[in-house]
Amino acid sequence: MRYDPPFHKTNGLVPIIVVAIGLILFPFVFTDTFSRHLLVLVFVYAMVAVSWDLTLGFGGLVNFAHVAMFACGIYAYAILAKTLGVSPWLAIPAAGVVAMILAVAITLPILRLDGIYVILVTLAFSQLLYQVVISQSDLTGGTVGMVTLPSLKLFGYKFIKDGKIGYYFTGLLLLAASVTVIYWVIRSRIGRAIVALRDHKYYAQSRGVSEARTRIYAMAISAFISGVAGGFYGSYVRVASPDAFGIGFLTIVLSILLVGGVGSLWGPVIAAFVITLLAESLANLGPWREILIAILIILIMVFYPGGLWAAVQELREIVDVRRSALTAWFNRRRYKGRRQELLNVEEKYIETDHGTIAVADSGGDKPVLLCLHGNSSSKEVFQYQFESYRDRFRVIAYDLPGHGVSTNADPETSYNVAAYADAAEQILEQLEASEPIVIGWSLGGYVGLELAARANVKVRGLVITGTSPLNIVPDDFGAGYNADSHMILAGKHFLSPTETKNFVTSAVAPLTEESAYLHKAMPRTDGRARLYMITKINVTDWPRQARMLREGKIPFAIMNGPEDPFLNHQYIADWPYGNIWTGKPNDIPGGLHTPFFNKPKEFNAEFDRFLKEACGF
Amino acid sequence: MAAGTSIGLFGPNGHGKTTLLMTISGIIDPWRGDILFEGERLNREGERKSQLSRNINYDVIRRRRMDPKKVARAGLIHVSQGNTLYPEMTIAETLAIAPIAANGRVEETESLDKVYSLFPKLYERQDQKARFLSGGERQMLSVSAALMAAPKLLLLDEPTLGLSPKLRLELAEAIRAIKADGVPLLVVDQDVEFLESLIDTLYLFDHGRISRRIEKEDLPSYEEIMSLLFEGAS
Amino acid sequence: MPMEALLSVLTGGLVLGSLYALMATGLAVVWTTLGIFNFAHGAFIAVGAYVAWQISSADAIGAGFVIGLVGAVVVLFVIGVIAHFLLVQPFERKPNLVLLSVVTTLAGATIFENLLIVGWGARPKQIAPMLEGDLHLGEVSISQNEAIIIVLVLFILALVGFFLRRSRTGRAMRAVAQNREAAQLMGLDVPKLFGMAFGLSAALAGLAGVFIGSIRFINPSMGADPLLKALIVVIFGGVARFTSPIYAAFIAGMVEAFAIYYVGLYWAPAVLFALMIVVLVIKPEGLFGKHERSV
């Protein structure tokens, strides 16, 4: 299962547009050539670092010949454009091709190697290239290098005479193209193969991924970009010097990559800006500059080895948690009346170990009907059940921790099915409600199953809807649901507006006036609740739930919509229930994932029948 | 656990028996609770704090609650599951460094003699590297290395795993001899009969918890234990 | 090839080989115990040379060569232990230890190199050799300094080998290298042993620095070339046994000496690199390698 929306439908779109506009306007705001020069350097470093990440970060192949590919790109440009007189515009891509061919040659000896050997061989190979370059002084100028390389020209317009604007935009364009290529590659089949080989080599191989071919592809693509960067750099500084092979340049680019974050696309780009500008601002410190930067890199690696991109992610998470908490706090006051109107009961707040929980309780000394809502929703989804059953039952619904107007809770302990069941027990105890009949929807269905399986509370009857019973996790998870892309969103941390709309439309209902508040419930939900529901899946004792269902001591029914896009209906029908009402899962005609909301009349009729036949009401 | 008695742990795979032993010996840092041995606390006080950030390297910021070295030197020696020890070192070399944990509690030559009399095979092959040994011999080497460290309690994690029935018997005999020599044991194993011959008390392990304690006198049959563990499941 | 030239090439190869052996053994000790590649090894060589220069040179303290040598070894051992604590220890439990330590040791190398520039300036210096004059053995003529270096290196390597094989600490170090978890369960002090291995490696690098410094000039970036040569030697020979990089070092030294004679100074390193790559393609675990890594 993999979810890859097109880029313009992700949350990355807006920041990229903002940054792109900023970079396009930059040379017109800062008109001095020095700041443009710095940015050109940033673009070159970023290209080298980002393309290196394809092999080192995504491929897990510690390829130290990458910087040599850059240097070879410079020399290839120098020889082609100066000695052979090829047009610079042709020489730059040709430099990429030269680097690519060399990279394939390097890959051949390392095809059988792993880990530290790859470092050693690639490092040795790049030194071999260095030795060859300095020994061929007729062709390469030896240790002196080559100077006065041809610069770029476009229809008589000379790039060296326009205050570096031409180079600035060429560099920006090349960087954008490189990032696009890498973005495309890591989402393609090749990219998946590259990552699969890194994560689990033997498993990937046994599934038919060719290690040799994938390595060659990865090395070739990353070397091409690096070579192009080298060619462009050669045309810009107009010098080809053997220093580019040196350990100094390697250290800079490697630091950019690691400070940015290995295995991320944007991290190295960000770090290229940070490190280059930092290095420039310390330029007048001499050797102390190198020392300070090295100390900084060590400090980052020691204390925060994830690098800048991880920091950005963490910052984003903090902001998102604050935002959702603030939304909940605001909603609790602002829309209280509307919520109470929907359910026609007063909202209460109960302190539990899992935060403050907002509870709707129709009250009275009647049998208890507990309604548990699903992932990224809120208790109001049960409005029609409140309406129909409040006369005969004490209907209770609450917002799960991190959902609705309940507070956010500690993700480590409170965002999993067992914790939700624990919260339910605490709420029932504080409300002095006992022996509930439970309706569980989707995630709430698991909470209901868990509540019944824990048997701390006697459950008089249990109906699950939109839930596949699980026994062996995660295998059954894959079997019980359709790997529909909207389903995968259920466990995604951050959602874009399109994703929210897609998910709620599939899970609840298309956006109408009636369901508008449910579309708002999803962005309020703490994203960590979705994430930890998946990561903490093993906290719950799933076989115990399965045992409970097989024993069949509790009246139990399944009421699903036959049109439910998420469920694998065959899996649910084949499950070996010990005692299920009517002997099979029940269909609510025309129902979707949320039949009690889409088809309340039909659902309630069926539920009435269950109450009467199975629970004796 | 009472002094001088031996106990066994029995439970399904993946329910945390090995994790428990790893925690006792300090390889895994425990979240809460204390590990007391002979009245001495082997861990630092307080709870292990949960991590606020996924990316900060807490290894350098927080001290671990437990130090495996301290546990081993207190006399709790752990023979881990399917362990090959040091593939490139000979039996003699391995046994020579093993007494480091004993802190000079015993005479080395004496315990070496004892080990070689217990496992004469090892004496024959003492200049072989560990990677050339068979699975049974490796396991014998692990147990002997633990014995050289003068254990006050021997933690054995599935000592008979992957061995042929004959070797299993041989090893069981040796472990019985060790026990008869006065070394208390904590054995994890899947073989109830094997456990029965070694231990005084059996603990059943289920979902990370000790679910039942059974004294040796009323040790039930294999089928009964299975039904205790998997009640209701078919 | 005339006899005289052959003999001088052979002695040259022997000197190079013994220096390479010293450096490669240092690298191999860290590689096999900690499983990482120490890019600061070249910087340790330079630091060792400068420490020895500071202690021995008449322009500085002027305590003589032997005290300089001992001083360099002691100081480098301490630096190695500290470097391990700061640069490698923090990632001990991280799965991507290899990559992280590559970056930190590279950064460490940058720091040492620039501190040398700050402290002593970039101008080359020379350590006065141990013994002046030449040694004549029949047809062969070798400077006394180089002769004593060869003897000393062999003696020191034998000592290190003895330490790793026979002493309890050395054996414990090898045990930690081969199975860290088992070593922990046996009560070995793993961080201390790792630190000692790193210190030992740094001390060997320092020694190499002193010897190189007494033959050639020293400057702050003098470690880069020896580091690469040591790297070739380690790849070339593999690390299956303590002795395999040593044999490989002498082979590499001889190859380089002959290559200088036949194809010239510029092409000699390329010959070595090409040879190494050929070895790797045919036998990736090294000339004397078996598949496992260990001391």
Image (cartoon, coloured by chain):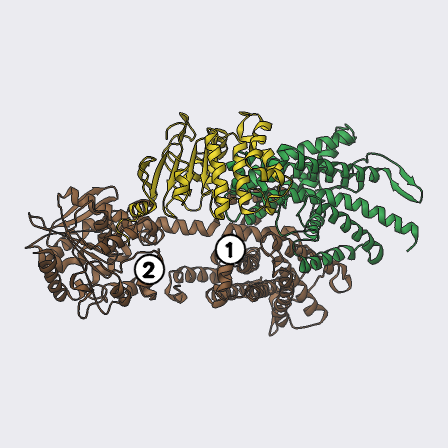
Residue that badge 1 annotates: A268
In this rendering, would C24 be left or right of B55? right
Q: Badge 2, how many Cα within 10 Å: few under 14, some, many 20+?
A: some
Q: Which x, y percent locates residue A546?
A: 27, 55
Please tell me whether mark 2 or mark 1 is closer to you in this view: 2
Residue depicted at x 76% and y 57%: C271
Q: Which x, y percent locates residue C48?
A: 70, 37
Residue that badge 2 annotates: A476
Q: Which chain is yellow?
A: B
Which is nearer the N-term, disc 2 or disc 1? 1
Tag 1 subunit: A
- Nearest the eye: A393 or C215: A393
Q: Quadrant of residue C139?
A: top right
Amino acid, disc 1: Pro
Residue B4 visible in the picture: yes
Check chain identity for marks 2 and 1: say if they share one.
yes
Amino acid, disc 2: Asp
Q: Which x, y percent locates residue A556?
A: 18, 57
**Vertical comparison of B148 with A342: above or below:** above
Q: Which x, y percent locates residue C112?
A: 64, 40
Q: Colour of chain C?
A: green
Q: Colour of chain A?
A: brown
Q: Badge 1, how many Cα within 10 Å: few under 14, some, many 20+?
A: many
In this rendering, would C164 be left or right of A4? right
- Nearest the eye: C132 or B88: B88
Residue A303 visible in the picture: no
